Image (tube, rainbow, N blue to C red):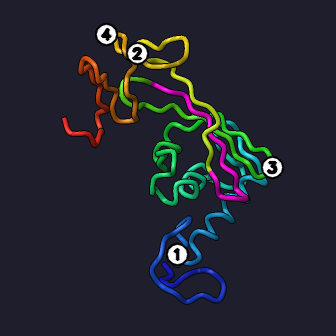
Amino acid sequence: MNETCSWPGCNASQGRCIDGVLYCAVHYRPKLKEVVMAGIRAGVDDKAQCKTVPGWKNRFARWVTNDDCLSPGGLSKAKIVGRGFDFSINGQRVRFSIERHPAGRVCLQKWEFNAETDELQLLDESILTAEFPIDGNGDARCPKCANLLEVSAGRIRCAECGFEIQHEHTLYPR
């Protein structure tokens, strides 16, 4: 394998590979974007399969999450690749859905990534199942005392009675 960047005119070493081809830190993201944009132009099916760009979903997820540094919405490359579905493309915008599993519930989220601006936006979120009641306003209620629950991705907690559910990967002390 070549030990220097494959970008035309660049001789830098050390970097990341795309399809077994090395690109330096300066040229890796532009090359990744080029590959993703080729898939956007060619079109993908609802499972993010592209006939002209094999592995497009993986490359898209790498670009969106900056190679697994979590995106603002807490999405990781592994989550997009493993659970992302219902992909569609409209111009430079890629929409997809993903099932998320925060503490005590399962949510369906719809996201849109704008390839022109590199912006990821949560469009919609709905709770599919929950281990606690949801009232008519969509608020989480404590199953013990019916007070509002404090809700975060890693923990559901009732300040009144102490009811609590923690996500198995939570950062909160147990």
Asked if the residue under mark 1 is in contact with the one under mark 3, i.e. CB atoms within 8 Å, the reply is: no
Q: What residue type is labelled 1?
A: Leu
Alpha carbons under labels 3 and 2: distance apart: 41 Å
The amino acid marked with disc number 4 is: Cys
The residue wearing badge 3 is: 91
Can you say whether 115 is above or below 156 in the image? below
Residue at which label 4 appears: 145
Magenta stretch containing residue 38, yes or no?
A: no
Question: Which quadrant is home to the C terminus?
Answer: top left
Locate residue 33, reporting x and y percent. Answer: 65, 63
Q: In which quarter of the image is residue 105?
A: top left
Q: How far apart are marks 3 and 1 (CA)?
A: 29 Å
Asked if labels 2 and 1 touch by Cβ distance under 8 angstroms, the answer is: no
The one nearer the camera, 45 or 147, is: 147
Q: What stretch is highlighted in magenta?
A: 106-119
In this rendering, the label closer to the viewer, 3 or 2: 2
Q: Name the residue under label 1.
A: 22
